Image (tube, rainbow, N blue to C red):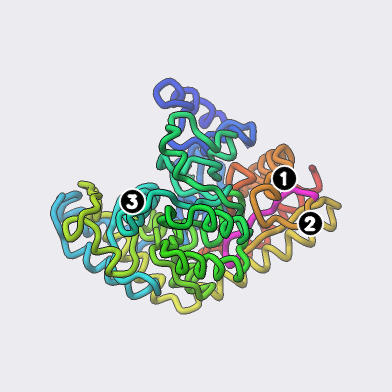
Amino acid sequence: MEFNNSILAFERAQKSIPGGVNSPVRAFKSVGLNPVFVKKAKGTTITDLDGNQYIDCLASWGPMLFGHAHERILQAISEAAVNGTSFGAPSQYETEMAELIIKMVPSIEMVRMVSSGTEATMSAIRLARGYTGREAFVKFAGNYHGHGDSFLIKAGSGAMTLGIPNSPGITKGTAKDTLMAEYNNLPSVEALFLERGSEIAAVILEPVAGNMGVVVPTKEFLQGLRDLTTKYGALLIFDEVITGFRLARGGAQEYFGILPDLTTLGKIIGGGLPVGAYGGRKEIMEMMAPVGPVYQAGTLSGNPLAMAAGIAMLTMIDETKDLYSAMERKAARLEKGILENLKIAGIKGVVNRVGSMMTLFFTESPKVTNLDEAMTSDTERYASYFKQSLESGIYLAPSQFECLFVSYAHTDEEIDRMIDANLQALIKL
Ligand code: HOZ
């Protein structure tokens, strides 16, 4: 494969954009390669500037359940655009979107739209603090909730990939209110509540972690968090930016049958356009201005193009009866193939999967249930695996600590090609 045009594009980009990218993990730094510049994407196929084609397993970090440039989403965007691209004033799109989210997500009675998952989590924490009158919150090592100051402490995703989980620029004053606990370790949360229960406004988590690679919670862990937060009068916040509408119509909360007080959403609900949202019980959400005193605002919040795309996306999700069963079947087949390949290639690894999200960890550890275990992965081995996969036409996340996403749009033939490419890559490691 030739990458000459991507190399030139990256050289040019680095002169005007820090690191040549607008989000760090895209720079392919941790896999030691030049990033591939995308020219276009349609369905499950990405085409780069050099004309190379890849089966896409990144899905724009999750949202492309139906593949890229889906006709219904394109049509919704173009129909909306004719009538104006931003109003900074209410439109009925926003209400329709809110009604769809409320209908589909079990715990949401009211919802506020914002423009990214980062805005959603920042606002949800502010709301939890305003509602409870408390300042601290509990976050789990390796969970990533966007780049708001108070979340960049032992953060996953790009921050972890690049070795900067605690970013400079976060003041001690901010950091002191973020209490750290270990994922899947309920006693680590109990200890914090025992010590500082009356100061804790919320516990926030990814109900399936996707930003230290996929890490699956035990049902007891989630139930324990629900019980603890209720006991101490703190709010439970599920960050469903990745899991919302991907694991089930009602997200991880429907999948596991455990309801949070607040939920944050992103990515999928914009059908690929920049959108986030946070929602929950009415009495909590009515703390937000202009009804209540907690402030949050944005000219682009509820943007008509993003709402139109999101309405089309959620409507398709609602109408596609075999969506989750089909993704489960395809992802299970891929998982089985990868596990068999590991045996054939004699390579140690752990595959964590829930529904259509999975990660192959190159680790000797028998399981990966928290950040420490995720960190035992051989990231250099992942980098070689990534490179081999790319050259066989498979586009994976450029980091060990992210997810592989199976889409409804992937065909069985593509799943077989992924399994074949996986074996070829493993054999060469
Ligand atoms: N936070 C994203 C991964 N979980 C990365 C977003 C991006 O680089 O585009």
- Give me the residue at 36% from left, 53% from top: 120
* Rendered image: mark on residue 377: 1
Reading the image, the residue beneath label 3 is 126
Reading the image, the residue beneath label 2 is 366
Give the amino acid type for the residue marked by disc 3 in the picture.
Arg
Label 1 secondary element: loop
Residue farthest bottom in this picture: 321
Q: Do we see residue 221 in this rendering?
A: yes
Is residue 320 on the magenta stretch? no
Task: Return the disc, 1 or 2, that comes first in the chain's sequence.
Answer: 2
- Local packing at callout 3 (Cα closer than 10 Å; few below 14, some 14-19, many 20+) is some
Give the amino acid type for the residue marked by disc 1 in the picture.
Ser
Beta carbon of the mark 3 residue lies under 8 A of ligand 1: no
How far is disc 3 from disc 1 in space, using C-alphas?
35 Å
- Local packing at callout 2 (Cα closer than 10 Å; few below 14, some 14-19, many 20+) is few
Nearest to the observer: residue 378 or residue 37: 378
- Please identify the quadrant where the C terminus is shown: top right
Give the amino acid type for the residue marked by disc 2 in the picture.
Pro
Look at the picture and state if 25 lies above or below 258. above
Task: Return the disc, 2 or 3, that comes first in the chain's sequence.
Answer: 3
How far is disc 2 from disc 3 in space, using C-alphas?
39 Å
How far is disc 1 from disc 2 in space, using C-alphas?
11 Å
Nearest to the observer: residue 94 or residue 119: 119
- In the displayed structure, does residue 30 sit left or right of residue 197? right
* Rendered image: mark on residue 119: none
Q: Which residues are magenta?
A: 354-364
